Image (cartoon, rainbow, N blue to C red):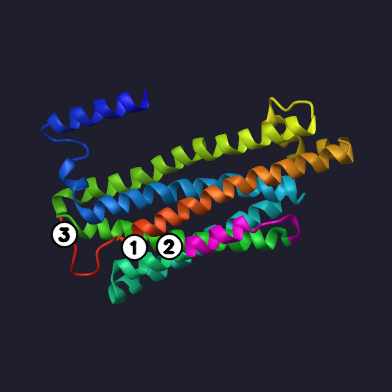
Amino acid sequence: RLCVGGAAFLWWERRAAEPILPAAVWRHRVIALSNAASLTTGALLIAVSSYLPTYVQGVLEHSALVAGFALTAMSIGWPLAATLSGKAMIRFGFRPVAVVGGVFLLVGAAFFVTLIPRHGPVWAALGSFFTGVGMGLATTTFVVAVQSSVDWHTRGVATAANLFMRVLGGTIGAALLGSILNTRLRAHLEAAGIAGAQDPLAEVNRLLDPAQRLSLPAETVARLQEGLALSLKAVYWGTAVLAAVSFALILFLPKKGRETS
């Protein structure tokens, strides 16, 4: 249905007198690359914001408050980097700033991939912070680059398309990475012989609730935490792939003065 709907949308847009997303906009190199990178960074963002608290609460056994602080680190890094990106773009151009943002995304992904229980919530918060810095540099640059590549008449459409791609990336990322988590967790629970393996999310909720976790046998808790940690490790490898793809797309952005439509 998604493919059919997308094809119908493109067919109609090509024939509309005033299309919502003019095809000419997408043929611009800067816009096409920025929108593609916004798609992958949007998927990466949803992975961090959705599954980092689950790891801190379920695997590390910390409270929701600590999990919230770990995630808040991204909200600190993002506006700080976005604020600095404005002056940096004026001085160096949008491509170098975007490249630095891509590097920070890779660093944040590396923290998540290497996250293990003994590292504690501080390690998770550092990964969250570096991801926020990368998002602040990269996404701000994407918007400015897109707006600078079109005339005033098309600027609103181009900006909306870029933001739409980030939201679409979050939707796709939630579905894709969520399926990876559920599949890996179900397989682990079935191999461990834990009842309720067909509903892995229910088992995860038991870990997240301190009262229910205390009512479970220690062996069951250990197996659930092991399965959740391994499943989230697969999710974080997915974020590493998304960060790598985002960085590759950023590298293809034209250098200053070489933007071509």
N-term mark: 3 or 1: 1
> Label 2 amino acid?
Gly
Q: Does 115 appear in magenta?
A: yes
Is 153 magenta? The answer is: no
In this figure, which residue is indicated by the disc labeled 1?
251
Query: Which residue is drawn at the image coordinates 35% and 73% (left, top)?
Result: 88
Question: Going by the image, does 200 lie left or right of 31?
Answer: right
Q: Position of residue 195 (x, y in %)?
A: 79, 26
Q: Looking at the rendering, in which quadrant would you find the C terminus? A: bottom left
- Visible in this render: residue 73? no
Q: Which residue is at the far front?
A: 191
Name the residue tied to disc 2: 102
Q: Are marks 2 and 1 in contact (CB under 8 Å)?
A: yes
At mark 1, the secondary structure is helix
Answer with the quarter of the image where residue 18 lies: top left
Magenta segment: 104-118
Q: CA distance from mark 3 to mark 2?
A: 22 Å
For the point 49% across and 50% down, the residue is 45
Q: Quadrant of the N terminus?
A: top left
Residue 212 location, x and y as percent?
82, 35
Q: Earlier in the sequence, mark 3 or mark 2?
A: 2
Name the residue tied to disc 3: 260
Label 3 environment density (alpha carbons within 10 Å; few <14, some 14–19, many ≥20): few
Which residue is more in the foreground, 96 or 161? Answer: 96
